[in-house]
Image: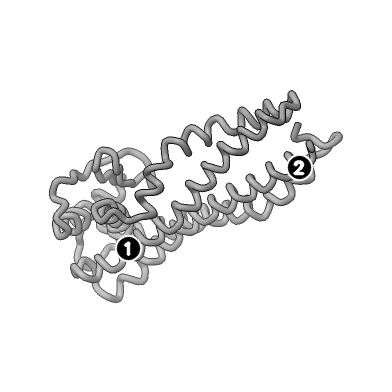
Amino acid sequence: MFGYGWGLDPTFIILIPAILFAAYAQSKINSTFNTYLRVRNSNGYTGFQVARTILDNHGLQNIPIELINGHLTDHYDPRKRILRLSDAVYNGNSLASVGVAAHECGHAVQHQEDYAPLTIRNTIAPVASIGSQLSWVLVLAGLFFGWLQLLDIGILFFTVAVLFQLITLPVEFNASSRAIAMLTEYNLVPVNEVGPAKKVLDAAALTYLAATIVAVMQLVRLLLLRGRRD
């Protein structure tokens, strides 16, 4: 299966740099978010107020903003058209809070404008979700029993999940760009505070990049393992 003699399969080596980068990215977002979570924005706006202002200015008064449990669980739900913010963002008036709130609003605006990458991501999301759950079961079963067709199906499912990760990158980067532009356009934070808010969003974007790299390298590894079965 994934063993190689009594040691680790040598293909695992290609994952190590990606895993280390992912660990760095997670550490970066945690430290950056926590740093600017303690820095109050000069206008004193909460994440909720920032989000409501942005949505209303884009004619999205029909989108409710809900409080959600957890840490960095903030997200826009395109199916229910609901913006959900964690307590630290919803009720917080820090630079981190307004940056994250504006970013999630960026997704709502993308949805309103039928931003192509978001539309594609939403379309393949159900298949990608199923693929990410089933792929490893099929891959492990295929490797264990030597059923190459089962292994190929597992790799195909995982490829869809990787495609989802890839299309997520432009969606997230664009939402962050929109967030910074909207914070400035609506004078929600002073110009000198835009930089710190951007640092939070850049750190968050790094986690998506890291997750994509890990997924791509996992796919490369699976293809190498498949090639050894021919």
Instruction: Give the percent coordinates (x, y) of residue 41.
Output: 26, 65
* Residue bearing mark 1: 39
Instruction: Give the percent coordinates (x, y) of residue 67.
Output: 25, 41
- Image-based side of 65 in relation to 215, left or right: left
- Image-based side of 116 in relation to 145, left or right: left
Q: Residue at x 49, y 58 (%)?
A: 206
The crowd level at tag 2 (other Cα within 10 Å; few <14, some 14-19, many 20+) is few
Between residue 224 and residue 148, name the one nearer to us. 148
Q: Quadrant of the N terminus?
A: top right
Secondary structure under badge 1?
A: loop
- Image-based side of 106 in relation to 132, left or right: left
Which amino acid type corresponds to the residue marked 1 in the rendered image? Val
Instruction: Give the percent coordinates (x, y) of residue 186.
Output: 18, 67
Which amino acid type corresponds to the residue marked 2 in the rendered image? Gly
- Image-based side of 56 in relation to 214, left or right: left
* Residue bearing mark 2: 227
Q: Residue at x 31, y 53 (%)?
A: 107
The crowd level at tag 1 (other Cα within 10 Å; few <14, some 14-19, many 20+) is some
